[in-house]
Image (cartoon, rainbow, N blue to C red):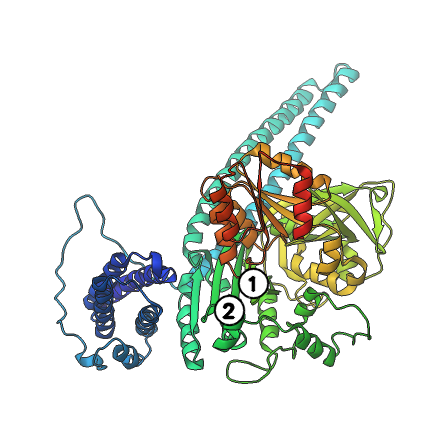
């Protein structure tokens, strides 16, 4: 019976998470929520809790079900108070389930029960006695679900064994190359023997010569057969490894929800303790990553969420005066992209206090004091200081706000994972922290390059392009060698620095003008850097192992990998390389890395997002705008445009959008932009063939800065409109 209960609890753990996630998604947009579906979920949750004899959970679900039934019967929809009450009940259920899962004492649910109108007594909460489980078999032709408990350490060990096996296969590939070389040598020897016989005439020992010749032919033939067999075996092992890796990933890669799924409840609990109204949004936790990566990220994420409540919380009067909703909005979003796990933690509070951070950095000697009349420092430079020990923007020290050590610990945790942390200002107000870490801490696709006589690996996720340029193709920009290259259809100027110079922080050697230099373009968002190397030798998927190398700065390497024939190479951290360049040569390449302050950028290049489903129209508008010096990014419809705007990979200054488009039209795109606190101030021009007066009025009422009809399209009008807006 104990085994059966364990299986039932494991099944309940999966089922209750699914129900809670579905209900929370509905609560995120209560006006559009299908309340009957929410009711069905709560009813199913009650039945599942009854099946495993979790009385408090059953009673909480029952009371939630009753309250929702009252809302449905009244036909009034969910008001904010009802949403808060349901969240309170869900948080209590989540706490009970978590304690049950971890073998901890069950938390007191009396507050939630009382708020839901129940008698806060878990022992007498169940009005309905648990029904005895009836052993019903599965439907004909279907297999009953099976639950297997796997120790996470076993999964990690299995994954490590797989990575070692992969290394052995790579060594086997090197042996195959050796066999092929022997075959070529044997063939060459056979040809030489034939030439010797032809020149030497009849050999007195013809029988011995003939035997030698036959033996040599057999050697060549056997080597050929060995080569073919080894090639087939190597291919078969490689295919098996690929299939095995995919299966192992199903074990070792786990949904982020399993590690981070309870953090929404934590934020709501913190906000209640602080007397704050909060709206928590958790998105993308279906993303899968290695459990050890997620577990290493959990504490940094918790700290950042606490910061969002502590630093982002504002009095209701202050929020109202700023035109904000009365509730603090906190978002946790996970995204998998390019082999990386990206976590976004954002709030719509007052945003980081740049002056306070700068003053703290100056006080600790991290930045020199600004001379009177000197230009303001760029926001990126100041925000980077927030991750230094002892630098804090908190005005007070309390249980939530620390003493400036928290962000430093976040940065150290991410560096240990081979990742990075960035602090950003949201528009028009608020704070966002972006955490980036590998989905898998071990297996990575690497570009192998030689620099300064040593081999290095660079993860492919951070590489934009591989190039070859001569010194004559480069120019000096603000004292730094730079190259003008095309990226995504736009010209950018980016600094060029030898990789060995950047690693060892030595004086750069001049690039040879008579030979093409191999270059690796690495990037982080809109920041680009060209690394000059001696040679780019390979691109491989390799096992990255931990390495404690005191010869290099902490965080500069992600570990080490082994190539064929036991050749080691250091795997470099691209984020750390860019940070090192910014620290040591910022004055030489600020504009090239996209870090010039906004006033200077405004006088140089503005970026326009053109949204139109017609490729002809997109191409025409792109050519017209680029001819006037604008940088242009294209989107095929409103959904594509919103993804671009919210990706934080490009700084958009203006949107020019068509109206009639599939998936999301221009009006819906405009509404989404103006409803997003981070995009609300972004100007939008609607440009369409619809010139109906009602459409024009609708576009302007929704917040468009201008409405241009294509029938009366005039380039001068477009440029004048853009000039007026920007």
Q: Which of these two is toward me, 697 or 363?
A: 697
- Residue beneath label 2, please? 301
Circle 1 SS class:
strand
Q: CA distance from mark 1 to mark 2?
A: 9 Å
Which numbered disc flags the more N-terminal residue, 1 or 2? 2
Instruction: Give neighbour class at mark 1: few <14, some 14-19, many 20+ (Cα, 10 Å).
Output: many
Query: What residue is at 59 percent from the left and 73 percent from the top?
Result: 407
**Residue 196 screen position, x and y as percent:** 76, 20
Q: Nearer the viewer, residue 618 or 337?
A: 618
Question: Is 119 on the left or on the right of 214, as rendered?
Answer: left
The residue closer to the viewer here, 7 or 426, is: 426
Please indicate whether residue 461 sits to the left or right of residue 151 in the image: right
Q: Residue 195 in the image: x percent, y percent?
A: 75, 19
Q: Is residue 298 visible?
A: yes
Q: Furthest-front residue in view?
A: 693
Q: Which residue is mark 1?
A: 435
Answer whether residue 596 is visible to the viewer in this image.
no
């Amino acid at each position: 019976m104990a085994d059966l209960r364990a299986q039932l609890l494991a099944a309940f753990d999966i089922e209750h998470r699914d129900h809670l996630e579905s209900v929370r998604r509905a609560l995120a947009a209560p006006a559009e929520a299908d309340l009957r579906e929410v009711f069905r979920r709560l009813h199913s949750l009650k039945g599942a809790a009854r099946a495993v004899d979790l009385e408090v959970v059953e009673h909480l679900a029952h009371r939630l079900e009753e309250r929702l039934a009252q809302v449905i019967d009244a036909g009034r929809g969910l008001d904010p108070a009802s949403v808060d009450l349901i969240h309170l009940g869900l948080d209590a259920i989540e706490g009970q389930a978590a304690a049950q899962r971890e073998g901890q004492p069950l938390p007191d649910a009396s507050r939630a029960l009382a708020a839901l109108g129940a008698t806060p007594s878990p022992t007498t909460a169940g009005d309905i006695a648990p029904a005895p489980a009836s052993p019903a078999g599965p439907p004909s032709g279907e297999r009953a679900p099976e639950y297997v408990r796997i120790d996470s350490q076993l999964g990690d060990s299995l994954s490590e064994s797989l990575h070692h096996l992969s290394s052995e296969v790579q060594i086997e590939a090197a042996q195959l190359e050796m066999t092929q070389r022997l075959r070529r040598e044997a063939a060459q020897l056979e040809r030489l023997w034939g030439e010797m016989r032809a020149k030497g005439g009849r050999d007195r020992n013809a029988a011995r010569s003939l035997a030698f010749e036959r033996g040599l032919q057999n050697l060549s033939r056997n080597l050929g057969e060995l080569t073919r067999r080894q090639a087939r075996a190597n291919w078969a092992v490689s295919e098996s490894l690929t299939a095995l890796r995919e299966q192992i990933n199903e074990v070792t890669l786990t949904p982020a929800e399993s590690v981070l799924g309870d953090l929404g409840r934590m934020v709501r609990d913190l906000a209640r303790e602080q007397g704050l109204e909060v709206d928590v949004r958790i998105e993308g936790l279906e993303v899968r990553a290695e459990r050890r990566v997620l577990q290493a990220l959990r504490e940094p994420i918790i700290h950042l969420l606490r910061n969002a409540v502590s630093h982002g919380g504002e009095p209701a009067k202050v929020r109202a005066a700023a035109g904000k909703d009365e509730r603090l909005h906190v978002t946790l979003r996970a995204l998998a992209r390019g082999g990386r796990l990206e976590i976004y933690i954002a709030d719509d509070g007052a945003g980081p206090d740049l002056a306070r951070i700068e003053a703290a950095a100056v006080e600790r000697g991290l930045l020199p004091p600004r001379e009177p009349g000197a230009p303001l420092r760029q926001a990126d430079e100041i925000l980077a200081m927030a991750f230094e020990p002892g630098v804090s923007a908190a005005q007070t020290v309390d249980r939530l706000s620390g003493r400036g050590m928290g962000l430093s610990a976040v940065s150290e945790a991410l560096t240990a994972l081979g990742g990075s942390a960035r602090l950003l200002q949201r528009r028009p107000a608020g704070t966002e922290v972006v955490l980036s870490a590998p989905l898998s801490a071990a297996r990575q696709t690497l570009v192998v390059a030689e620099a300064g006589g040593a081999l290095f690996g660079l993860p492919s996720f951070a590489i934009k392009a591989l190039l070859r340029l001569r010194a004559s193709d480069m120019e000096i920009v603000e004292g730094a060698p730079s190259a003008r290259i095309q990226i995504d259809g736009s010209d950018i100027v980016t600094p060029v620095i030898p990789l060995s110079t950047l690693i060892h922080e030595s004086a750069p050697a001049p690039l040879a003008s008579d030979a093409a230099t191999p270059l690796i373009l690495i990037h982080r968002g809109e920041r680009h850097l060209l690394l000059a190397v001696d040679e780019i030798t390979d691109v491989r998927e390799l096992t990255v192992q931990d390495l404690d190398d005191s010869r290099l700065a902490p965080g500069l390497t992600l570990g080490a990998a082994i190539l064929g024939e036991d050749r080691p190479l250091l795997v470099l951290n691209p984020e750390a390389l860019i940070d090192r360049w910014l620290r040591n040569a910022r004055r030489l390449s600020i504009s090239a890395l996209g870090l010039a302050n906004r006033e200077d950028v405004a006088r140089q290049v503005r970026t326009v997002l053109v949204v139109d489903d017609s490729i002809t129209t997109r191409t025409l508008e792109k050519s017209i705008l680029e001819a006037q010096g604008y940088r242009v990014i294209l989107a095929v419809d409103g959904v594509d445009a919103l993804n671009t705007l919210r990706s934080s990979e490009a700084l958009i200054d203006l949107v020019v959008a068509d109206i009639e488009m599939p998936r999301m039209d221009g009006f819906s795109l405009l509404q989404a932009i103006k409803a997003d606190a981070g995009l609300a101030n972004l100007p939008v021009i609607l440009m369409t063939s619809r010139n109906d007066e009602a459409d024009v009025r609708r576009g302007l009422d929704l917040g468009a800065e201008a409405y241009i009809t294509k029938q009366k399209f005039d380039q001068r009008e477009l440029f004048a409109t853009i000039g007026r807006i920007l």
